[in-house]
Image (tube, rainbow, N blue to C red):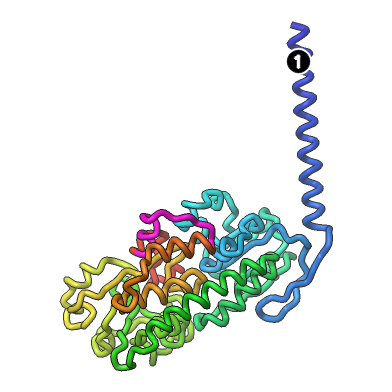
Amino acid sequence: METNRHIRKILIFFALVAIIAFGITMLRNEKTATSGNTRWITDMTGKKVQVPDPLTRVALFGGPTGQIAYILGARDQICAVTNTLKNSELVLAFDPSIKELPGPRSTSGHINVEALLISRPQLVIAGKLDGSIVRKKTGIPVAYTVSTMNHDSNLLKNEIRFYASVFGKEARGEKYIAYLDKTLSFVKSRTASIPVEKRKKVFNGYGPKHLVTLGGDTFMHERITTAGCSDATSGVSTAGVKEGLHSGLSEMSMEKVLGWNPDILVIDSGTAEEVYRDPGWKTVTAIRNRQVFKQPVGVFIWDRPTAEAAVLYPLWLAKTAYPELFADVDMVKEVKKFYGEIMSFNLSDAQAQMILNGKYGITFAAAEGKR
């Protein structure tokens, strides 16, 4: 009995030593993170922000931009994210731990300040609205991004380089940019000789009625034309705020779409077969030629100004519109290559096909403005 008591005392002693050692380690880490060296970063608005060096706890706000942490290999520096990223089926397949991160931001302008404070960020990266809320209600440094639906490839490169400088991942940032440039150059080289009058006209029809779209003043115009296609909405301005719709989106009339008579219809809800059966669409060339396609979905749906879609959407659309010009391109292989080399997501053929078929969640309802 005395021996058992003695053993218990020894076990308790070693347990206490372990707890104390863990506590000392945590305090040292916290001290390093909060009171060590500092450096200055310049955000996308030109504002200089002082941050700890090394920077180990960043809150990353913005649904589409969350993927940049994986592109840069900076996932371990993220302490809080937007809930959208936590609920991306593709991300969860390769990083289940993302579910455990705090999600203090739900949608633009909706931030749980208490949850943000609990996550102990050294820096918050956010757009103007979210960043102003954080600055007003907390003392946490904020680096601002530039949020615009006219998010062309040049702005995307600036964005990648900004994030790379924040996380100290400049080499990874340049690797992505080189991949982007190479892919877009390849697509343009294959489609350059297509006469203007023979370029396929594309209409992105979102929502349950397939009438909500991105205008010619958005990033989508560049992606469609890069693919060698004609943008049906090239003359449509979608600037400004519209009730129930995300900025950059606008609802068209059926008469206007019939007048455009697109060769290709890209949808984000329902199925192509449902559109083929709808009498209201029967005269459109895309329906008569059975050229209706579901928008692919990766970490985020590809009709957003994201880094994944900037590379893959023009290639996918070009292959879809001109299969004879891209007969040697296997989109399953291209998708696997991109996510493997750039995001370290080693997809199976089935997973790559799910992305191309738009089978991954979350549900993105453009017409309801839930992005």
Left or right of 177? Residue 26 is right
Q: Residue furthest top?
A: 1
Residue 15's image quarter? Answer: top right
Residue 150's place in the image compared with 327, above or below, is below
In percent of width and height, residue 212 lies at 35, 78
Residue shown at 17% from the left, 83% from the top: 283
User: Over which residues does the magenta segment extend?
Assistant: 343-356
In percent of width and height, residue 265 lies at 29, 77
Residue type pointed to by label 1: Ile
How many other residues sit within 10 Å of disc 1, few (<14), some (14-19) or many (≥20)? few
Residue 115 shows in the view: no
Residue holding disc 1 = 7
Residue shown at 80% from the left, 24% from the top: 13
In percent of width and height, residue 288 lies at 18, 79
In percent of width and height, residue 343 lies at 53, 61
Q: Quick check: is 338 in the magenta stretch? A: no
Left or right of 248? Residue 145 is right
Q: Residue furthest front?
A: 328
For the N terminus, the quadrant is: top right
Residue shown at 70% from the left, 59% from the top: 121
* Kind of element beneath mark 1: helix
